Amino acid sequence: MKNGDPLFVKQVTSRRPQPMTTDLVQKILRESAMRSGLVDENLNGKDQNPASPHALREAFGSIMVNKGVPDSIVDFWLGHTIGEMTQAYKGVRFEELKRLYSERERFISITAPESEVEERLRSEYEEKIKQLQTMLNSLVAENMDLKKRVSGIEDWMPQIKEVVNWHNEIRVEEQLEKESKKFHPYPPQGWREQRKRELINSR
């Protein structure tokens, strides 16, 4: 391979290797997805092939970020502009990038041993179960505490009702005393009892 030769080439008969075009890569991945049964001719109604270069690139970035790689390094790997850090990653920190990638390559590999994949999935599944169990235990504890508080309030309800009734009786008596002053010298017979019932029923 000479300097300037393309890394990915078409299958052609000419002596000069021809680089693969973007359209050709898109076509190959689309046909591969269809042959594997991942999508049909209409991409299962999706706007984008889930195995397209863009989708695979986004998946790579998401996996690396979720596995603890700093955003700036992931952006560098994806070819984003990251300013002055670009030269640092190309220079003295290049070995660090190789190490970070090597430690996480198995998470994006499609050739990993089946047992390793199963073990990884089982480990992630068990971790999720632990997280959910912790959340469930916390909710149960909060529910028990809430029930205790409600029970405490219910124990105080008779006393609270008694205080409220006593307060209402005072208010009714005050209102009756105020209204009775309009009568001279005394309110009509039976007025006080009738008016008291009206005031109580209106509260």
Image (cartoon, grey):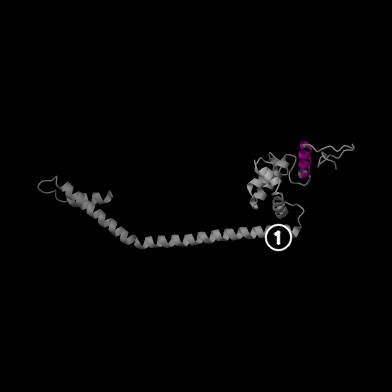
Q: Is residue 59 visible?
A: no
Q: Residue 111, how many percent across, how many down?
A: 77, 53
Q: Is residue 66 left or right of residue 115?
A: left
Q: Is residue 24 magenta?
A: yes
Q: Is residue 27 left or right of residue 152?
A: right
The quadrant of the rendering that contains the N terminus is: top right
Which quadrant of the structure image shows residue 33? Answer: top right
Mark 1, Cα crowd under 10 Å, few <14 / some 14-19 / many 20+, is few
Of all residues, the one furthest to the left in this rendering is 185
Q: Nearer the viewer, residue 62 or 47?
A: 62
Residue 180 % position (x, y): 15, 48
Q: Is residue 49 shown above or below 96?
A: above
Report x, y in % for residue 177: 17, 50
| x 54%, y 58%: residue | 135
Q: Quadrant of residue 28?
A: top right
Q: Looking at the image, which residue is at 57% across and 61% down? A: 133
Q: Amino acid at mark 1?
A: Glu
Tag count: 1
SS for dot 1: helix
Q: Which residue is mark 1?
A: 119
Residue 102 in view here: yes
The residue under the point 72% across, 57% down is 117
Q: Nearer the viewer, residue 96 or 196?
A: 96
Q: Position of residue 118 (x, y in %)?
A: 71, 59
Specify whether 109 is left or right of 71.
right
In magenta, the rendered stretch is 22-32
Task: Note whether 183 is above or below 162 in the view shown.
Answer: above
Residue 141 against residue 50 in the figure, above or below:
below
